[in-house]
């Protein structure tokens, strides 16, 4: 994979170079010391992946990510030495299309291969994502629904560009909105709690991590909070599971949507937002086949038109809508 490094700290650049050297297939094609240089370098040679710092002179990583995704889009991972202090910037960059975030590998402390492992694992996963290798369609048994149970659920999946899209969508819903909402966003579990807090603050709704064994509740917004998949069980509770272990997207939107199609007993809407790859498309189609309304974000408002495009290609979405028109549509559906 052709990789670029954007960082103004020589020690951080060296740490990243040493980490990447453990995988001979990775090649550092250029290094930029600030965001402005990175934008220009991308115009000259767009890499497969950029390892982007957040805090830099001249142009920070958030603005650099925005400009690169607008002009020469490619995979971007935020690399930071202090993810906790920069949590809002992290999600702002992800809103512009950054795929993930990871700590800068430690230089000269402990086993260097062990220090490099988290970064290399992220890069391996992203290699699968940008290759858009699909996973086989899983067979799901038909749902059995009791007519008397009419709980209301909105299942939402998002990836690259998702944090900002989720903020806009949730802001468009009123406080006390009746349906239960479950969000599945591709984000590492170490950042999930920060994302829930950020979404709560940004949207004005109460957002928290989903707990294993709880039931989606009216008026609550739950975010999948681990690197395991989240699924709905036959008894109506939520559960985290490592299976399927070969699923490259973690947590997988397909896994959750498929479980909703199989086990949800009330009214539901599936929503697939911006993201790279194909996760969620097959699950959304299963929801449509079960008679649920399914919505995909349109190309013009998607930071990365990958997942919604995949859904449109297999006719999984009943409706394709601009982001700002999804919340009003949800309000209309559940006011009937």
Image (cartoon, rainbow, N blue to C red):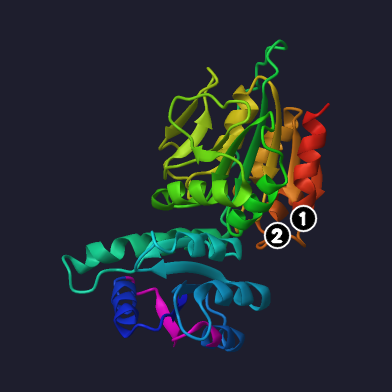
Let me know if residue 28 is in the magenta part: yes
Q: Is residue 300 above or below residue 321?
A: below
Magenta extent = 23-36
Pick the front one: 182 or 247: 182
Residue 307 drawn above or below residue 216:
below
Q: Is residue 315 visible?
A: no
Measuring 59% from the left and 52% from the top, which residue is drawn there?
202
- Few, some or many C-alpha atoms within 10 Å of disc 1 (few <14, some 14-19, many ≥20)? some
Helix, strand or loop status at disc 2: loop
Q: Position of residue 159 (x, y in %)?
A: 58, 54
Residue 302 is marked as: 2
Please say whether residue 208 is visible from this viewpoint: yes
Image location of residue 87, percent across then percent down: 45, 59
Q: Crowdedness of circle 2 by 10 Å Cα count: few (<14), some, many (20+)?
A: many
Q: Look at the numbered discs 1 and 2 and tell me whether their residues touch, using CB distance below 8 Å.
A: yes
Residue in the image at 29% along x and 71% along y: 22
92 with respect to 209 (left or right): right
Left or right: 26 as drawn, with respect to 48: left
Report the residue marked by disc 1: 298
Q: Give coordinates of residue 321: x percent, y percent.
A: 80, 50
Q: Is residue 287 magenta?
A: no
For the residues labelled 1 and 2, the Cα–Cα distance comes to 6 Å
């Amino acid at each position: 994979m052709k990789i670029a490094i954007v960082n103004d700290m020589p020690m951080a650049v060296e740490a990243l170079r040493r980490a990447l050297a453990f995988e001979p297939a990775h090649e550092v094609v250029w290094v930029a010391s600030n965001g402005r240089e990175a934008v220009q370098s991308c115009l000259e040679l767009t890499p497969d992946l950029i390892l982007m710092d957040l805090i830099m002179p001249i142009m920070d990583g958030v603005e650099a990510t925005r400009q690169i995704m607008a002009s020469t889009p490619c995979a971007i991972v935020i690399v930071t030495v202090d993810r906790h202090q920069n949590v809002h910037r992290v999600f702002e960059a992800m809103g512009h299309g950054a795929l993930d975030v990871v700590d800068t590998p430690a230089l000269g402390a402990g086993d260097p291969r062990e220090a490099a492992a988290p970064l290399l694992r992220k890069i391996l996963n992203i290699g699968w994502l940008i290759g858009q290798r699909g996973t086989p369609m899983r067979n799901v048994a038909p749902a059995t629904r009791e007519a008397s149970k009419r709980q209301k659920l909105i299942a939402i999946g998002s990836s690259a560009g998702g944090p900002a899209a989720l903020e806009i969508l949730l802001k468009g819903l009123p406080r006390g909105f009746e349906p239960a909402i479950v969000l599945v966003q591709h984000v590492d579990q170490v950042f999930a709690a920060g994302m829930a807090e950020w979404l709560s603050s940004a949207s004005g709704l109460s957002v928290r991590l989903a707990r294993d064994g709880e039931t989606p509740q009216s008026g609550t917004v739950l975010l999948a909070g681990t690197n395991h998949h989240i699924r709905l069980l036959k008894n109506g509770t939520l559960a985290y599971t490592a299976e399927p272990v070969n699923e490259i997207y973690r947590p997988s939107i397909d896994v959750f949507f498929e479980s909703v199609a199989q086990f949800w007993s009330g009214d539901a809407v599936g929503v697939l937002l911006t993201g790279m790859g194909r996760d969620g498309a097959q699950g959304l189609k299963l929801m449509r086949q079960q008679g649920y309304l399914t919505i995909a974000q349109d190309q013009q408002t998607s930071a990365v038109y990958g997942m919604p495009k995949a859904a449109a290609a297999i006719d999984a979405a009943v409706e394709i809508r601009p982001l700002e028109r999804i919340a009003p549509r949800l309000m209309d559906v559940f006011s009937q």
